[in-house]
Each structure stands twice: as structure tokens, then as C-alpha cells.
Image (cartoon, rainbow, N blue to C red):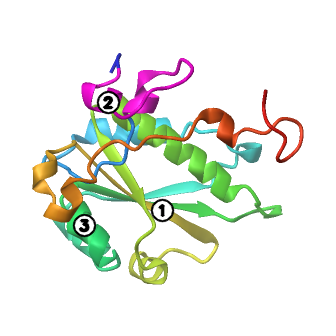
Amino acid sequence: MSSVTPEVSQARRAEYPVDPAVLNRWSTRAFLKKEVPETTLLSVLEAAHWAPSAFNAQPWRFIVARTPEEREKFFSFIGEFNLGWCSQAPVLILIVSKTVTDKGDFPSYAFDAGAAWGILSLEAVKQGLATHAMTGFDFAKARETLGIPQEYAIQALVALGYPGPKESLPQGLQEREVPSPRVPVKEVLFEGTFGHPFK
């Protein structure tokens, strides 16, 4: 995708030049009931696994549900609100990350998994897909249901698929189905010390 989509351009404008994929990535809740080809899904996951990590430890793991039976298993621990829209997504991906290495505790496991998620979401846009990450689910039940070892932290659940029309959503969500803006970039920057404005 070489340009910002019309829908996105109405809600988002970068103050400084960025790749259009950065702006085109937003968290839709409307998905088509259209299967994602395995090669496309693997391209997205391939990109994610090239994320940087401390000591190249690569702590992230992706538990993928893409069959009706696998998704039903995931539905058992997703909260009612999120289930109301994400049940339409053809792929669900639970991101977990290993909290220890053979040298002991691994303090950057969440940071590194976040980097992998960020790259996953951008590659999804490049492949014509949409993503929506969520934490509105029962972490303990997910761990039990999917047999996740204790040394892995559960980070987030991602819905992935082709974007669909907002009319496919429950009425209350249709008006929220727009790309969200951001505060000006300098509001999140400090220079030199915390609280010192970036100039």
C-alpha cells in the first residue's frame, strides 16, 4: 500500500513524513468472513519473528487459531464485549513471551514481544489485512485452556483478517469504527530529562 487511504486521511495526518502503512494501521473491529491464505498468514508471522530482541533471545511465541474448532477454544476465554466483534475474524493469535532464559530472568520479554506485535501489525497492512489487539479476556483461563507454561507471560490476543464493512458490527460499535487520531508528537517527547520539553 503506497498511500494513505481516504478513510484514514480524514482522521489522521502525520506532522512529519512516515510510511503510509503506519497511518493505515488502525484497530478495526469489522472483519470479513474470508479465510486468510496460509502463505499470507505466514508472511505476517515471518515479519513479526524478525523483530529485534535483547541478546537475540526472541522470547515471543504466537498461538494461532484459524480453524472453527481452534477459534471456539479461544472464544471460551474471550470477554463478552470483545467476543461480540472478534468472533468474525478468521484468525486469532495469542502472543506470549518467555520470561526467563538459561541465564535467569529476562526483563525485556514484554518490550520485545511488543516489538514483534508492532511489526506483525504493519506487515498485515502491507498484505491488505487488518488487526486488532486486545487484553479483554481471561488470562488464567487462556493459560489453562491452551496449556501455556508458567514461564511464559500472556501479552495480548490479536484478531486478524480482511477488513469488513462497519455495518457488519453491532449498532453500538458502528459509530466507533473509525481510525483514531493521536496527540501531537511533541506531547509525548521529553529532552534530556523527564518532563523537559523537546524543542
Taking depth in this image into account, of 9 and 160 the one nearest to the observer is 9
User: In the rendered image of this protein, does residue 96 appear above or below residue 35?
Assistant: below
Q: Which residue is mark 2?
A: 10
On the question of residue 33 being in view, the answer is no
Taking depth in this image into account, of 126 and 3 the one nearest to the observer is 3
> What's the residue type where badge 2 is placed?
Gln
User: Residue 140, which numbered label?
Assistant: none
Q: Range of the magenta residues?
A: 4-24
Is residue 11 inside the magenta stretch? yes
> What's the residue type where badge 3 is placed?
Arg
Assign a secondary structure to mark 2.
loop
At a point 60% along the width and 69% down the height, the residue shown is 152
Given this view, does label 3 or label 1 mark the residue nearer the observer? 1
> What's the residue type where badge 1 is placed?
Ala
User: In the rendered image of this protein, does residue 59 appear above or below residue 147?
Assistant: above
At a point 15% along the width and 58% down the height, the residue shown is 169
Q: Which residue is mark 3?
A: 71
Quadrant, the C terminus:
top right
Q: Which residue is mark 1?
A: 156
Q: Is residue 151 left or right of residue 28?
A: right
Assign a secondary structure to mark 1.
strand
Q: CA distance from mark 2 to mark 3?
A: 34 Å
Q: Earlier in the sequence, mark 3 or mark 1?
A: 3
Asked if disc 3 and disc 1 are in contact, CB closer than 8 Å, the reply is: no
Crowding at mark 3 (Cα within 10 Å: few <14, some 14-19, many 20+): some
Residue 38's x, y, as percent?
A: 26, 42
On the question of residue 122 being in view, the answer is yes
Q: Earlier in the sequence, mark 1 or mark 2?
A: 2
